[in-house]
Amino acid sequence: MTVKKKKGIQISRGVVHGPVFYFEKGQLSIPRHRIKEAEFDAEVDRFLEAVRISKEELTQVRDLVLDHLDEDHARIIDAQMLAVQDEEMVKSVKDMVIREKKNASWAYFDVMDRYESMLLQTLSDFFQDRTVDLHDIKKRVLYHLQGDKSSDIPKITKPSIIVTEKISPGGLINIKHNMVLGLITKEGGYNSHAGILARAFRIPYLSDVIDIEELNNCSEIILDADNEEILIDIDSDDVHRYTKRIRNFQKQRIQIITDKVASATKNGEPFHIYLNAGFVDEVKPLNPELIQGIGLFRTEYLCIAENKIPDEETQFQAYKSVLQSMGNLPVIFRVFDFGRDKLLALLDMEIIQEDHVFDEWGGIGFLLENPDILKTQLRALLRASVYGNAKIMLPLVMFTEELRQTNKMLDNIRKELSRESIPFSQTIELGAMIETSSVLDELDSLSNLVDFFSIGTNDLALYLIGSGRAVDLTKNYYHPKIFHAIKKVIQVGQRVGVPVNVCGEMASDPYALIGLTAIGIRSVSVGTSALESVSKHVASMDTTQIEKLADPILKADSPASIYSILTQYQQKDIT
Ligand code: PEP
Ligand code: MG
């Protein structure tokens, strides 16, 4: 047999060998078992409770949609609310549980299946509104019925390479503990949050693979994300050739940071390298003696993992735990950044997502429009602040006014906590992420209200250059518009004494890092998988030489010329 190869784009490096687990988008995994008579009542109650919670969630979604979108979209939710509690459907499920002794998920799935085929054939009055998406409803109710938070993620019974059309950050979080050897998708993006997570979990990942269906018929494959290829129709000789690399990768995969992160360049110029994280479990194994702190803690991952916004106490415990693991090192908690590809599970509706209606709706703007969510989070953060060196950062800032409003809310919370005799740090710093085009015009006024700036190059590229996060944005790292915007932030920061950090994926790209250093960046925050290489790179840098590239970079008129300046420098540096 000759080996066949398929190509893809590397999202996360590594090489693995194993069986394929192919799943189609929208496929639901349903536990099916017969129940005893004594369990009937409890099973029916469980089902009714799942329907009740789903209805409650849909009410919240409807309010959000009405506030932010339009009647048309709200009507979709109205239709879903009616369908989710349809009396006939509820009765059919109860009957099936009792008569056929099927567990509730199974019975519900079968009943909904019947409804779906009915809808296709007859277009009954109730379902005449074609916008009713039974699949969304089914997913939601089954999710609450199963309680294992994985109703749309099939059960994986042995370590496998997952092959699917596309994967959401929520999907990836839910399957991470489920023996994922590697990941192959048709659609994806380096800067997508699923991509960022795959790198955090060190799961080799190739996207943009065409005809992924072909992989459905393969029993075992080799995923060589390092060389951007998939080997199919393999035999034992092929596996043998890869064994050494696979073993080495396994070792690297479990290895956590073992060397002290560089704090200066080769010529002795101080340089900060912080970490990006989003899970308490990701932070716990880190040795605070070896690192410099967390430059970006993406708090919304707590919501994605829980599939809801955790209450104040749960958030407080999570933030406290992160701070305690870090000793006195700084931890920058970015408040929830919902929207775009980080849609709340609450809004996990394909029918809405496919419209891209929330693409530009998120960050601090969303939170200020939903002040209860923000207030709860700020209270939890302030309460946790006494356990370490916490800082707060606002995502997707567009206007100075957003900082004013947040400061006002913080003042009120401080007063409230004092009245309740709850301790909090009096000196907690507040920072703004610079990642939209509109904020670039407000840097001066903004600088009066913040303690630091952190540049989110992933979204900045989106705003300045306009392509989506789910496409390969790597080339945008070398775009003149990006370098000019970052230079502007550095200049304002220097003039008014506000420190500037870069926390987007651009800082992990070796060439882009040279460019950032050339124009004056001395502080970055990168994912755990990039930390070691960035640290080595910084330790080998001579800023007196690199700074000479600033002029040519800022004068260059195309990404290609910037790329060539940076690669040529790197070549010379190596030789
Ligand atoms: C960014 O946009 O660059 C960033 C760091 O934030 P996120 O990737 O979470 O949107
Ligand atoms: Mg961002």
Image (tube, rainbow, N blue to C red):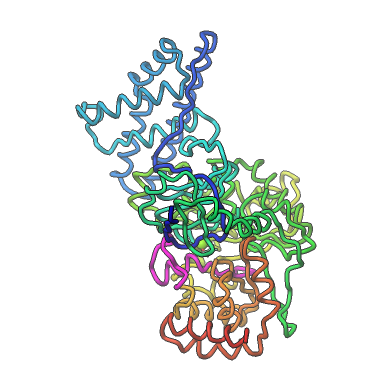
Magenta segment: does it hold 516?
no
Q: Is residue 334 above or below residue 316?
A: below
Q: Is residue 310 left or right of residue 72?
A: right
The reply to whether residue 237 is visible in this rendering is yes
Image position, residue 190 (x, y; %): 48, 62
Q: Which residues are magenta?
A: 449-475
Which quadrant holds residue 266? bottom right
Magenta segment: does it hold 462?
yes
Camera-side residue: 494 or 233?
Answer: 233
Image position, residue 329 (x, y; %): 75, 62
Q: Is residue 367 above or below residue 63?
A: below
The reply to whether residue 372 is visible in this rendering is no
Q: Is residue 129 left or right of residue 261?
A: left
Q: Is residue 4 above or below residue 487?
A: above
Q: Is residue 191 left or right of residue 91?
A: right
Which quadrant holds residue 464? bottom left
- Residue at image coords 51%, 14%: 35
Image position, residue 319 (x, y; %): 68, 50
Give the residue at the far left of this rendering: 122
Image position, residue 191 (x, y; %): 49, 62
Give the residue at the far top of this rendering: 37
Camera-side residue: 181 or 275?
Answer: 181
Which quadrant holds residue 226? bottom right
Camera-side residue: 444 or 281?
Answer: 281
- Residue at image coords 73%, 68%: 261
Q: Is residue 163 above or below residue 151?
A: below
Q: Quadrant of the C terminus?
A: bottom right
Q: How many marks?
A: 0
